[in-house]
């Protein structure tokens, strides 16, 4: 392997990031995350290991997972080789941390974050690598201060690596986290990038660290502001209805979910992003002028938050 691809340093950083995030969010909730360390068998299509940390039934987080994985395979799965056909047949290695937090309070938004690196190996040619990741916010009841703070944190994380990155990655996020069959965004967005290698490995890894380290800065103040907001059955019902959109996106469009399932990944860890309760209603529409309608008119739209 090319010595400049220091995957041991990436692994060390990701495990530390997972620990910092779960320690912080567990302290906010008042309950620790459980830890499930796993390792694939040598005979499995996908080899490797990981650590899944979960919280369920907490006082703040109804369900949440922060997963680390380091997996290796002999050939790229269809979800990856379709985008990079020139790499078909190569063995690969992927490391990442991915999280989704589903708070109990409907006024507290769901959040997703992922940082990862992917390396396609070849017996004689140099390895091909790329970085991917980002974070995005999915509120059920919108607050402009929350959206602005989240987007400003994303902008600041990318600023040291080029002024063009935030507008590019924000646009990418708006386009990626979009439910085409519903003609609506999943949430208020954030940043998203994939197949990113233009900075080289060292700077790409530095950008990964900056994005990962920005997560708590972006999300923790929002949770602490909204965790105790009063709510009733109406707000809870709307939260469960909107969670259905989250399920639809993750099972139909999400690249990470598809990659994991197609490559023989660990199903429990892959599907930790699912909310604990979600509802579907036939052709439901919010009342005009309601707070629920305001989510659609003021927040589920593409806009420049910062």
Image (tube, helix red, strand yellow):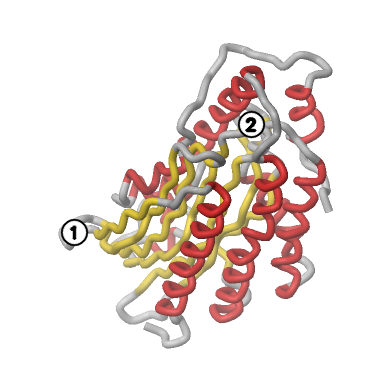
Precedes in sequence: disc 1 or disc 2: 1
Q: Residue at x 67, y 26 (%)?
A: 231
| Residue toward you, 62 or 12 | 62
Q: Secondary structure at mark 1?
A: loop
Residue located farthest toward the bottom when viewing the structure as drawn? 3
Is 245 rendered above or below residue 218? above
Q: Read off the residue under disc 2.
A: 106
Q: Read off the residue under disc 1.
A: 41
Q: Residue at x 55, y 74 (%)?
A: 205
| Residue toward you, 197 or 135 | 135
Q: Position of residue 260 (x, y in %)?
A: 38, 50
Q: Residues within 10 Å of mark 1 (few under 14, many from 20)?
A: few
The C terminus lies in quadrant: bottom right
Judged left or right of residue 114, residue 48 is left
What numbered label is drawn on residue 296? none
The N terminus lies in quadrant: bottom left
Judged left or right of residue 213, residue 124 is left
Judged left or right of residue 258, residue 166 is right
Q: Position of residue 203 (x, y in %)?
A: 61, 78
Is 222 rendered above or below residue 252? below
């Amino acid at each position: 392997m090319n010595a400049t691809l220091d995957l041991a340093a990436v692994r060390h950083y990701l495990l530390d990031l997972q620990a910092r995030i779960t320690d912080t969010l567990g302290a906010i909730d008042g309950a620790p995350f459980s830890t499930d360390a796993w390792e694939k068998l040598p005979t499995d299509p996908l080899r490797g290991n990981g650590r899944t940390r979960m919280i369920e039934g907490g006082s703040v987080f109804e369900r949440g997972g922060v997963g680390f994985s380091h997996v290796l395979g002999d050939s790229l799965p269809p979800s990856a080789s379709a985008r990079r056909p020139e790499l078909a047949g190569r063995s690969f290695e992927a490391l990442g941390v991915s999280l989704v937090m589903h708070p109990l309070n409907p006024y507290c938004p769901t959040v997703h974050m992922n940082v990862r690196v992917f390396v396609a190996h070849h017996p004689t040619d140099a390895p091909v690598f790329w970085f991917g990741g980002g974070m995005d916010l999915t509120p059920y009841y919108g607050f402009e201060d929350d959206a602005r703070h989240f987007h400003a944190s994303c902008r600041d994380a990318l600023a040291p690596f080029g002024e063009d990155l935030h507008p590019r990655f924000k646009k990418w996020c708006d386009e990626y986290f979009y439910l085409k069959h519903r003609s609506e965004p999943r949430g208020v967005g954030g940043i998203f990038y994939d197949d990113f290698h233009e900075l080289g490995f060292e700077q790409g890894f530095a950008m990964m660290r900056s994005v990962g380290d920005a997560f708590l800065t972006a999300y923790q103040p929002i949770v602490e502001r909204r965790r105790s907001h009063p709510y009733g059955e109406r707000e809870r019902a709307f939260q469960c209805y909107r969670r259905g959109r989250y399920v639809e996106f993750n099972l139909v469009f999400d690249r990470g979910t598809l990659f994991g399932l197609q490559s023989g990944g660990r199903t429990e860890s892959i599907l930790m992003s699912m909310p604990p309760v979600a509802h579907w209603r036939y052709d439901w529409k919010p009342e005009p002028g309601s707070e629920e309608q305001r989510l659609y008119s003021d927040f589920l739209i593409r806009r420049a938050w910062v």
